Structures are given as C-alpha cells and as structure tokens.
Image (cartoon, rainbow, N blue to C red):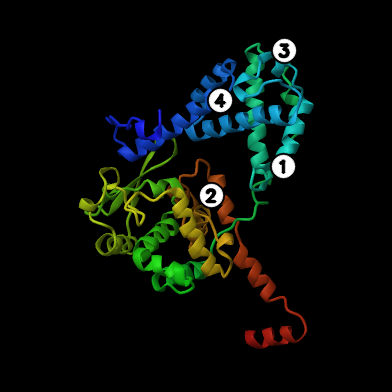
Amino acid sequence: MSDGDKKQLHIHNKSDKPDNVVMKENQIIEDCETLQKQLPSWMRGYFSYLRGNLLPMSRRGYLQDIRFFCQYLIDETDLTNAESTRDIKESEFREITAVDVNLFLDYCRRYKKETDKAIYVYENANKSLARKRSSVSVLFKYLYRSGIIEKNITDGFDPIRLPKPGERQIKALQDDEVMRMLDAVTTGEGLTKHERTYWEKTKYRDKCILMYFVTYGLRLSELQQLNVSSFNFSRGEFLIYRKRGKESTMPLNKTTIKALQDYLDLERPTDDSLEEEHKDALFLSLQGKRMTERQIRELVKKYTSICMDTTRRNGYSPHKLRATAATSLIGRGNDIYDVQVLLDHDNVTTTQLYAAHKLNTKRDLIKSFEWGDDLEEYLDEEE
C-alpha cells in the first residue's frame, strides 16, 4: 500500500484524555509492534513480558536495543547465519556467551556506520550503555526462565559504572541567565538576521514556551501535548498528562497568564484557519500544525545559547530548563517535598540532587580566594 493509499487513523476516544494524548500513546504502541515484527517470532514471550512490566516508551527503548543487538550479531560476528534480524534462530542464541555480550557492550561505546555519502561515528556514555545492558539482560533472563536457553549468562555481564547521586553535575541556568534568556526572546537581541525574520512571527509563542518550562519544570512531552482546552482561566489552572497516565493540575500565576494571553491574542492563528487535527493544539508551527518535540527542543537551544553566550549547538535542552525550575525553586527556600510534587519526581532523593547543586556557593568561595593584587582589591571591597 502506497503512502497515498494509507487509511486514515481515527480515534474513538471514550477516556478523559484529549485525542492528541491518546493518539501519541497509540503511536508509541504502533512503534513497538513494528519493532516486534523485525525480531524473531520465538521472542513473543519476551514481548509480552515487556508489555506487562514497562511503560510504552521504555518498552520501545528495550525493543530498539534488542533489534540493535540482533543487527550487531549479523553485521559484526559469525554467531548467526541470518540475513535479517527476524531470521535469527533459537539455536544460535543458545551459543551466545557472556563474553559475546561484553564484546557487544564494548562495541557500543564507539562504533561507525557507513553510507554511500558519509561515515557516521556514534559514541555512547555509560548511561546509554547501562540501558543497553539492561535490555539484553532482561532478554537473556527471560529466555533462561522460559527454557529457551540452558544457562543464565547474565551474571557474567560486565558491570557499567554510573555516577552516584551527587557526583553528576547538575546543568541548569542561573537566575540572571534566565532573565537574559527572557530578554532575548522579548527583544530579539542576539538573534541572527535570518532568525529575526521568524522571531517577528513567533516571539510571543517562544516566550510563552520558555516561561512555562522555567516556571513549572514541565517535561518536553508534557508541554508539547498542551491544548488550548487544557486551560481553565476562571479557576486559574491548567491540566497536564504525565507518565503512567497520570493527570496533574497546575496553578497559573500572573506572568504565565500574561505570557499565554499575549500569545493567544496577538499571534496564534484563529481556529477557522486550522486543520481540525490542530485546532486545539496550544503551540503551533508557522504551518499551523502542533509543534513537534524537535522544533521545541531547537527553540530552547537557540535562546539558552544566547543567554549563556555559546553556540546554538551547545545551548541547553528542555530537560535542563526543568532542572532550572527545580534549582530556582529550592534556592528560593521552597520546601523540597512541594518541589517534588510539582516536578512529579517518584522519589524525593531525585529532588534532593537539585538541592545539593551549589554552583553559586563555589563561585562565592573562589571569589574570596584571590591572590596578590587581586586579594588586596577584594579586601578593600569588603571594607
């Protein structure tokens, strides 16, 4: 069936969730089903195990890792004679050892893929390696419990060290950087001539997006899925849909109300000019369609790069604006458990990582630790 002949998908939605949220969840499930069809049919029990124990996004990630592992077996080893990942046999998996898996994990640290036009180098940090190790471990444990393989080889998998809580550097904007970022989106200062042509048409939208990230610490997917109907101005609140199907009501304040109303009144197209699918979408592209996560991510990188005086490539991601909200709220003396609820952290220890972020303390310490003429100047200032 060609793309033009594809049947249109309709959602018969009797849940409380908006259609766009249900549609997105369905897309993830369809992605999982597509991945399963690319893997051996004798792994069906593993697919069922993942479906019953993991959220759809995590399940998709595990299936992608297993497909990558199977493709590695074909391309980089002599452990299988299969030409496609779907054709790998049970008997071939029985011959795989812990050493083979460790070689795979080592390969994943840095590998190349060559196309007709270019050679791409991929490099994975330990966090990504740990996820791949986990995906393969769960598969081999399932195969052992199911009697498909005779030995549990997972005990022989090399450990992958992850930073302990507190060792990881929290990357977040400082309050003065947030103000510079908001100034940039308000005035257009720091944008290139090309970027300013788009900014003239999207400045209220862009400011609203940034304001909601740094105020509420929303996840990218939560912001991207916001609808106009998500907001109840008479109650001063809006509704978001979080992981595991949770709903959460967020209060509005003066700055977030103003940012939103400016966008709705001065910039957002009217519903009669939009396709039915996008009429309720809050943040729209210049084409009148719901913004994609990629578009929002690039927008955030652009404005954060301006406030940090760095390249667009080195700008911050939306997740770092989530960290910014956390560190700013805690830094202003808010209760850590209240911040945990706002950010939807499963465990307060995650929130505590942001409480331990003391970059300003480090700066104050070093500022007072001058030498030579600079020390005398510092002491004079203190007097």
- Which amino acid, mark 3? Glu
Report how far apart the C-alphas of labels 4 and 2 lie in the structure: 39 Å
Compared to residue 241, the image places residue 296 above or below, namely below
Report how far apart the C-alphas of labels 1 and 2 lie in the structure: 30 Å
Which mark is on residue 38?
Answer: 4
Residue at left offset 27%, top offset 61%:
261
Mark 4 vs 1, N-terminal side:
4
Mark nearer the viewer, 4 or 2: 4
Secondary structure beneath label 3: loop
Secondary structure beneath label 4: loop
Report how far apart the C-alphas of labels 4 and 1 lie in the structure: 24 Å
Mark 3 vs 1, N-terminal side:
1
Q: Estimate the x, y position of residue 357 in percent, counting from the top left.
A: 60, 58
Q: Is residue 207 left or right of residue 326?
A: left
Q: Estimate the x, y position of residue 51 in percent, counting from the top left.
A: 49, 24
Mark nearer the viewer, 4 or 1: 4
Q: Is residue 270 left or right of residue 3?
A: left
- Circles 3 and 2: CB atoms closer than 8 Å: no
Give the residue pinned by disc 2.
351
Structural crowding at the residue carrying mark 3, measured as other residues with C-alpha within 10 Å and reported as few (<14), some (14–19) or many (≥20): few
Mark 3 vs 2, N-terminal side:
3
Mark nearer the viewer, 1 or 2: 1
Report how far apart the C-alphas of labels 3 and 2 lie in the structure: 43 Å
| Closer to the camera in the image, 111 or 352 | 111
Report how far apart the C-alphas of labels 3 and 4 lie in the structure: 25 Å
Give the residue pinned by disc 1.
109
Secondary structure beneath label 1: helix
Report how far apart the C-alphas of labels 3 and 1 lie in the structure: 29 Å
